[in-house]
Amino acid sequence: MIINKDLVIVGAGPAGLAAAIEAKENGIEDILVVEREPVAGGILNQCIHDGFGIVKFNEALTGPEYARKYIDEAERLQIEIATNTMVQDISSNREVTTISPEGIRTYKAGAIILAMGCRERTRGAICIPGTRPAGVFTAGVAQNLVNIRNIMVGKKIVILGSGDIGLIMARRLTLEGAEVLAVVEKLPYSSGLQRNITQCLEDFGIPLLLSHTVTNIEGHERVKSVTVAKVNEKEDPVRGTSIKFDCDTLILSVGLIPENEVALNAGIILDNVTGGASVDENLQTSIPGIFACGNVLQVHDLVDYVSAEGELAAKSAVSYIKSIKTGEAEITVKAGKGIRYVLPQTISADKDITFSMRVTIPSKRKTIVFKDGEKQLKKKFFMALNPAEMVRIELKSHELKDIRGLEVYIDE
Amino acid sequence: MNKSREIVCIVCPNGCRMNVSYDENNKVTQVENASCKKGEEYAVNEIQCPKRSITSTVGVINGALPLVSVRTDKPVPKEKIAAALEEIRKIRLEAPVKFHQIIMNDLLETGAQLISTKEVARLEKM
Ligand SMILES: Cc1cc2nc3c(=O)[nH]c(=O)nc-3n(C[C@H](O)[C@H](O)[C@H](O)COP(=O)(O)OP(=O)(O)OC[C@H]3O[C@@H](n4cnc5c(N)ncnc54)[C@H](O)[C@@H]3O)c2cc1C
Ligand code: SF4
């Protein structure tokens, strides 16, 4: 039996919840949000530190408090959230197969919004030599164990990777009585936000070893030590620079990957750089009627923009369900010099568009330029640009009028 | 003697790098490169009495989850954080715990309240 739904949303994190609320407020009644965990809220449930919602609500909420605002609102609007239910498969004609303790169900959706979030890169993905003892965790798993399950991960800890989750966990584990010996980062700069380096490392005197990596893990049953060495510009370890840290735990904070297996099976085209779907300015993927938002589209550093993206995806899905015609996205947006990626990847340029992007390396006093051929459309000056911080720039429809191509680059 | 220090503002994600000048009595004479008033306030505080909000967890007995997340309702002086965490670690709450329930008043005479940031239901015995 196939159940019809106007809108199916995959994932009840901040992206999916914001999308559901926006769609309901825009007149879509028949919405189903599918969530594999027992509760809604996504990764925010385990992010118990504050700093969420500063942009959107002008207060520094903790993750659970930010999530609760949306969960309460979804409840008030009587939005159906199926928890403990996993989306197993999505077909290109918008059939969604779910699996739950009640069994397997198939839905036919008027539109679908993908909001599955990210998973973490693991040690296997970065190949550290050495033994395979217990005591190696990814930062998100450690966060879940310590903050939700009341299981302490270790006493003497080294963290590899300076992403925000790693920095936040350095502080959290220190506050819980562990000794964090060092945060080790392969790149010459941190991949986390500056404010997290200040309040999570400097506050506690935890050293940040830039241009260093873990070259070996020792120990049989449990980690006994890790060896760290300096790396050169090619990221190869430099001889004679090894330091051995006696520790019982290694935490990896080496990046996030959008969780796109079901999208791939549906035949959605992904972007090699972001790992998320390739989308137009309505956040529509290569399959009409399927939209993407939040961390499954691009890894975000601020949840506030995750919610904003969810709302945009919902507005577009509502238009699609109501058969409101939108322009053909025929213009390709190119990431030029100094820009790692730009979203959306294609546009029709008939409305205002907020572009989000990340730069390749940190720099100071630089201008980001949008151009069509040789014609400059917009310039924006930045005191500092940092790969850890997503940049968002809005172009008005009149600025985009009659363009034939679009390239974004950093002016020297 | 006038001194100066670079302080990274942690109030919002912009993370402005401010230059703060102050005299021997820690009176702030100038804040450069702050993009807003909140940053200036933070800089003055950081010189005179640095404060941080505390977020942590508290054990729950008979709860659907073993822990409830908590925070202080305002920042507390940095030098009291270690002692405050000692106190927080000793607390055990009986489920259910309500959202924004006050768990401790006037934590170590800082004037800050410790409040829960999520709700934990009581585990119903089968
Ligand atoms: C481990 C980890 C820790 C993080 N910590 C921080 C932090 O400390 N601070 C910070 O600012 N940001 C943090 N982030 C970034 C954070 O993910 C984003 O800010 C934001 O929460 C992303 O929202 P989202 O809704 O896109 O994804 P999520 O919050 O990840 O929500 C996605 C939801 O989709 C569900 N889902 C996935 N696949 C399926 C499926 N097939 N079927 C059904 N449901 C599915 C998941 O269970 C999840 O609930 C962290 C991210 C990760 C991965
Ligand atoms: S000075 Fe203002 S804008 Fe800059 S980080 Fe602080 S609060 Fe944010």
Image (cartoon, rainbow, N blue to C red):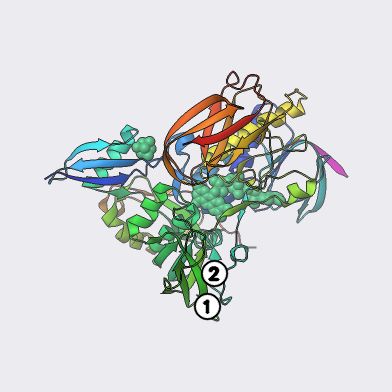
Q: What span is colored magenta in the figure? A: A1-7
Q: Which residue is mark 2?
A: A136
Vertical comparison of A332 with A157: above or below: above
Residue A6 shown in magenta: yes
Which subunit holds the residue at mark 2? Answer: A
* C-alpha separation, residue under disc 1 versus residue under disc 2: 9 Å
| Residue A24 pos. (x, y %) | 67, 31
Say which of A234 and A63 sits in front. A234
- Viewer can see residue B118: no
Q: Residue at x 31, y 36 (%)?
A: B33
Q: Is mark 1 within 8 Å of ligand 1?
A: no
Residue B75 is left or right of residue A378, and the answer is left
Query: Mark 2 belongs to which amino acid?
Result: Val
Q: Which residue is mark 1?
A: A222
Vertical comparison of A386 with A177: above or below: above
Element type where label 2 sits in the image: strand
Query: Mark 1 belongs to which amino acid?
Result: Arg
Which subunit holds the residue at mark 1? Answer: A
Q: Residue at x 27, y 49 (%)?
A: B50
Element type where label 1 sits in the image: loop
**Main SS class of the magenta portion in the image:** strand
Residue A147 is left or right of residue A260, and the answer is left
Residue A189 shown in magenta: no
